[in-house]
Image (cartoon, rainbow, N blue to C red):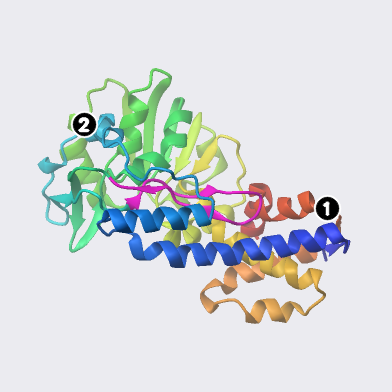
Amino acid sequence: MIQFERTPEMNTAMKSLVESMHSMRAYLTDVLPYMETVLTPGKEKALLSILRKYDIPEENLQKDIHMLKENPYFRSIRLEKVDTDTVRYQRSVIRKRTLMNMDFHKPLGRYLFHYHPIGYFSEDLELPVLMEGDNVWMSPAVSEIESMREGIDKGHGKCLTFGLGIGLILYMWLLKDEVESVTVVEVNKDVINLFEKQILPQFDTEKKVTIIHASAYDRWNEAFLKEFDYVYADFWESTEDGLVCYTNLMEKKIDLPHIDYWIEDSILADIKYMVLSYLSVVYHKRSIMDFMSSIDPAMKRYAIKINKYFKRRSDTIHTEDELLDLIHSKKVLREILSI
């Protein structure tokens, strides 16, 4: 079992971590009522005051609409050509001054506080949306584009992605001189048919595009992954289903340096909170059952993994940096989820 040296520094570190978690929850409570609403000047002033309270680096909520309009995919690919038995196109209008997420997880400070960049445009925005029934299936939203930026930038050579969607990252990769070819693994045949018939013909490229109809889990093996120079996993909709999908991949125990995961930091946020709760119980010499009984039943799978991981460790944590590494290190978090 992992152990701690109880020192004034460690006492302060534990307190700061817990306070950051509480501050994060308070921040969400304060900000969520403003999301997806039209900001009046008065509401904007109040919201900026809230952001200053939590030291969020957002001095100007009005964003340049060209950050979206000048994106090559948004500018060149016409989704209005899409109309199938299962998926239909519609044009959604986001009213000017409507507050929305502009990206995903951004850490703030050394502890557990993080935020999503937010903002609005000063004019109405017409956004192409693909609908599956009454649900939004996919759209080239700002948060989608910005959250894929790392994956887009790192793409080179033979690229592989899991999850097709509307082909946003495929298109952006194909524009890069350093990308040789793009392969995608997609489990939904209807998605593949729609893409091949309606969207892929709009891609102006001579580079090879290969679409494999298969489950990501079936193709998630070392031999296949090593065929590519860069791999990007993105077959989940959000953090909610993302944690399950991500964990299933970790359980395959494949650790290769050329693989990245869409919104990984956001997916791991809840696991970080649980790790802190567990370590706090150990630090204060309480029963592990106190930790287990505090966990939502839907998250028990992860609580069991955390307990197994730290019971296997026999080292002693002496400093704040060592403690923070247990919580923030992707190596540690991936090892936990791989159990």
Q: CA distance from mark 1 to mark 2?
A: 51 Å
Q: Mark 1 Cα within 10 Å, few/some/many (few <14, many 20+)?
A: some
Marked residue nearer the N-terminal end (1 or 2): 2
> Where does label 1 land, which residue?
319
Q: Which residue range is magenta in the image? A: 100-120
Q: Is residue 286 above or below residue 63?
A: below
Quarter of the rendering occupied by the N terminus: bottom right
Residue 326 found in image quarter: bottom right
Residue at position x 79%, y 78% in the image: 286
Quarter of the rendering occupied by the C terminus: bottom right
Q: Is residue 177 left or right of residue 84?
A: right
Residue at position x 80%, y 73% in the image: 284
Number of numbered discs visible in the structure rendering: 2
Residue 237 visible in the current orientation: no
The amino acid marked with disc number 2 is: Arg
Magenta region, main secondary structure: loop
Q: Position of residue 190 (x, y in %)?
A: 22, 51
Q: Is residue 22 above or below residue 166?
A: below
Q: Residue furthest top?
A: 177
Q: Is residue 137 left or right of residue 264?
A: left
Q: Position of residue 222 (x, y in %)?
A: 57, 41
